[in-house]
Amino acid sequence: FFSFFVMQSIPGLKTTYRIIKEGSGATVSKSNTVTVHATGVVKETGKTFWSTKDAGQQPFTYQAGVGGVITGWDQGCLGMKLGEERELLIPAAEGYGSGGFPAWGIPPGGTLNFTIEVLKIQ
């Protein structure tokens, strides 16, 4: 019950998460090809910088646990189950760092709040 409200830590990381909706079955493991819906918000401004649910966008596919995406996302999604929806709170050091990502409106040192939903695991 409390896991729906309390942010949980990930060993060795500053990124935290909470499960919004439980999934079942297969879990995301290193080297899996994973397809997700994702929405990213800059915590400091409340501004959404990216959402696969926006018009014209498609679900996002990446290879898990191998460094192809920012660290907080890469490690924060490991162990997610098919259909699970998880909120990740990613500090700058595990996101876009001290430089931010100005093209997306992510300020230097910006904290990211992602909502990720696992659609497919291969």
Image: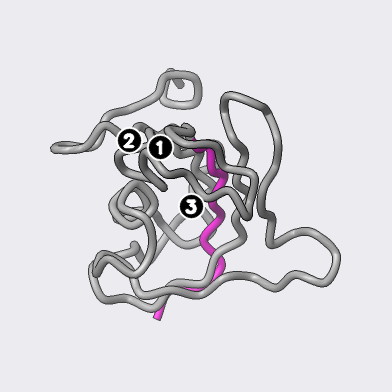
The x and y percentages for residue 68 are 34, 70
* Magenta region: 112-122
Say what secondary structure mark 2 lies in: loop
Q: Which residue is mark 3?
A: 23
Q: Is residue 81 left or right of residue 54?
A: left
Task: Specify whether residue 22 is painted magenta.
Answer: no
Rendered residue at 21%/37% (across/down): 13
Q: Which residue is mark 2?
A: 15
The x and y percentages for residue 26 are 37, 66
Residue type at tag 3: Gly
Task: Specify whether residue 115 is painted magenta.
Answer: yes
Question: How far apart are labels 3 and 1 at the CA level?
Answer: 22 Å
Which of marks 2 and 1 precedes in the sequence?
2
The crowding category of the residue bearing disc 3, from other C-alpha atoms within 10 Å (few below 14, some 14 to 19, many at least 20), is: some
The x and y percentages for residue 57 are 75, 70
Residue type at tag 1: Ile
Q: Quadrant of residue 67?
A: bottom left
Specify the farthest residue to the right.
55
In the rendered structure, find residue 90 and report the number of the disc placed on it: 1
Which of marks 2 and 3 precedes in the sequence?
2
Q: Answer whether labels 1 and 2 touch (C-beta < 8 Å).
A: yes
The crowding category of the residue bearing disc 1, from other C-alpha atoms within 10 Å (few below 14, some 14 to 19, many at least 20), is: many
Q: Is residue 19 above or below residue 102?
A: above
